[in-house]
């Protein structure tokens, strides 16, 4: 193998070795969905403990959209559109969703067919499973069914 061929092979090898870590770092930068791990959780106006608290969340499991990351801080957005910074330790990658708008029907089948299992009021939060184009698996405290994707915040 010639010297230029060896250089080419080394360049290819280096690009393969560095591609995976770069992709993993991009995943953390957002946007992605998370939920509140614990309570209370402070939302701050900037990425640091020296910034004032603008809101305190007291309900674990609420879905949050992570827009950006800086160190151990996450710029998040909640269902009402409020944005601020939260320590990553208060968030988990567990997917949850909250019923928005009107009452959401929870159906038996993944295509929205089947019998109506129950209705969930706006603000009800549950664990979000796999989503199809129009319906998502939804678990509210062990009661499982399928909810219209458009009826919940956190399924985008």
Image (tube, rainbow, N blue to C red):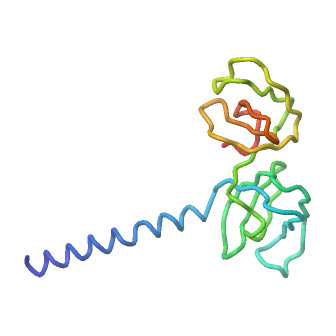
Q: Quadrant of residue 139?
A: top right
Tell me the quadrant of the picture where the N terminus can be found.
bottom left
Tell me the quadrant of the picture where the C terminus can be found.
top right
Task: Please tell me whether residue 63 is drawn above or below residue 18 in the rendered image.
Answer: above
- Where does residue 32 sit, x and y in percent of width and height? 64, 55
Does residue 52 appear left or right of residue 150 in this picture?
right
Tally the marks. Answer: 0
Which residue does the image show at 78% across and 20% down from the upper left? 116
The single residue placed furthest to the left in the displayed view is 1
- Where does residue 11 sit, x and y in percent of width and height? 26, 74
Which residue does the image show at 78% across and 66% down from the upper left? 90
Which residue does the image show at 84% across and 26% down from the upper left? 118
In the foreground, 73 or 58: 58
Task: Please tell me whether residue 113 is drawn above or below residue 97 in the rendered image.
Answer: above
The single residue placed furthest to the front in the displayed view is 142
Which residue does the image show at 84% across and 49% down from the upper left? 80
């Amino acid at each position: 193998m010639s010297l230029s061929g060896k250089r080419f092979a080394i360049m290819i090898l280096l690009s393969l070795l560095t591609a995976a870590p770069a992709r993993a770092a991009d995943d953390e930068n957002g946007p992605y969905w998370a939920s509140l791990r614990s309570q209370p959780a402070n939302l701050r106006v900037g990425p640091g403990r020296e910034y004032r608290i603008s809101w305190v969340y007291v309900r674990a499991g609420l879905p949050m959209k992570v827009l950006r990351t800086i160190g151990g801080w996450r710029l998040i957005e909640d269902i009402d559109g409020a944005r601020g910074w939260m320590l990553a330790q208060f968030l988990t990658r567990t997917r949850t969703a909250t019923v928005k708008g009107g009452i959401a029907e929870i159906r038996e089948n993944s295509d929205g067919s089947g019998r109506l299992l129950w209705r969930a009021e706006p603000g009800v939060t549950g664990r979000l499973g796999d989503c199809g184009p129009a319906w998502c698996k939804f678990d509210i405290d062990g009661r499982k069914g399928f909810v219209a994707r458009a009826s919940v915040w956190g399924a985008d």
